[in-house]
Image (cartoon, grey):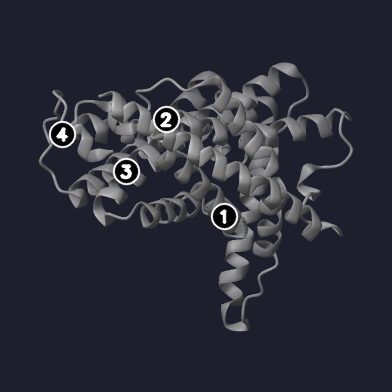
Amino acid sequence: MMDDVYLGKKLGPMRDGSVSVQLTALLFFSIVGGSLALGMSVFLGRLLWGLPMEAIEQVGKYGGEGIRFLKLTQVLTSLGLFAIPAWLMAKLYSGNTSKILGYNSSPQVFFLLVMGVLMVLQMPWINLTAEWNRSMVFPEAMKELYESMLARENEANALIEKLLYMPGLPSLLSTLFVVAVVPAVAEELMFRGGLQTLFVKAFRNPHLAIWCAGFVFSFIHFQFFGFLPRMLIGVLFGYLYLWSGNLWYPIAAHFVNNALAVLQQFALSQGMLEISTDALGSGDWAYLETAISLALSIPLLVWIRSKFLSIKHHKSSER
């Protein structure tokens, strides 16, 4: 991944920096980018809708304008925190951004569809891990920490609920863009294309790199009660990237994962669906549903791995 860039003709002005310097630069770009994105959101919120800064956390008080402001903030934050910093890091250290971040090859439509199937099949076992995560019991000595994390979780869920308010088709489409398209691209650029690539170079162990990137991916969302399933999903995306060498496949899987949540919420609110898919793997039949999910997901993952590695081997032999 990263080392391959140095064999190319395009080299960035900071190509000789160590991995630690590159990671520091990525963190710096992310902090600055996130701060600028927040400032831009506040400015545009006041300019377009006359909303104060407090509207970021109290969107419910401002009706439809507050929701539009929240969506704008989500998009700008994703770009400022994740997408642009990853692109800048790649530009400075290689000059060849598409190669270092892994989106230089066009994906095959068939495998994009396979990513969708995979994300549907994994629902029960992911939901079961979410149930385990939520049911964790803290010792009495950590009661204050537990209550603090629970309060933060409730605040985040309240914002998500506002974000997923979709009274009609236009709001569905805008929510899909904000919740599924932008995060899938921006977060995969950062966590798989950028961070995982740097971790591979630092650790010389792709498996350790994938799990570390998955940990950071989940941690950065600051939602403890969803930490475990989110980390496992990040690890899944990491292996899809490792096997394929093509960032478009984890982007597709990430998009499907988020889009399913949006479409489910829309269907529930419109009366088109009566039972949430979140019930899969968390009800009376949780362990049976999870066993079926794993029995289907694991062979599919083995097949995906063999196909992706075969494609990579074929391309390398043609060079």
- Looking at the image, is mark 2 or mark 1 nearer the viewer? 2
Q: Nearer the viewer, residue 27 or 141?
A: 27
Residue beneath label 2, please?
A: 311
Residue 244 location, quadrant: top left
Q: In the rendered structure, which disc, 2 or 3, sits on the residue that comes first in sequence?
A: 3
Q: Residue furthest top?
A: 170
Q: Position of residue 39 (x, y in %)?
A: 40, 33
Secondary structure, mark 4, is loop
Residue located at (54% from left, 38% from top): 304
Q: Which mark is residue 6?
A: 4
Of badges 4 and 1, the one in the foreground is 4
Q: CA distance from mark 2 to mark 4?
A: 23 Å
Circle 3: is it few (<14), some (14-19), or many (20+) Cα within 10 Å?
A: many
Mark positioned earlier in the residue sequence (2 or 1): 1
Q: Are marks 2 and 3 in contact (CB under 8 Å)?
A: no
Relative vertical location of residue 166 with respect to residue 149 in this rendering, above or below: above
For marks 2 and 4, the one nearer the N-term is 4
Q: Which residue is mark 3?
A: 197
For label 1, the residue is 223
Q: Residue at x 74, y 18 (%)?
A: 169
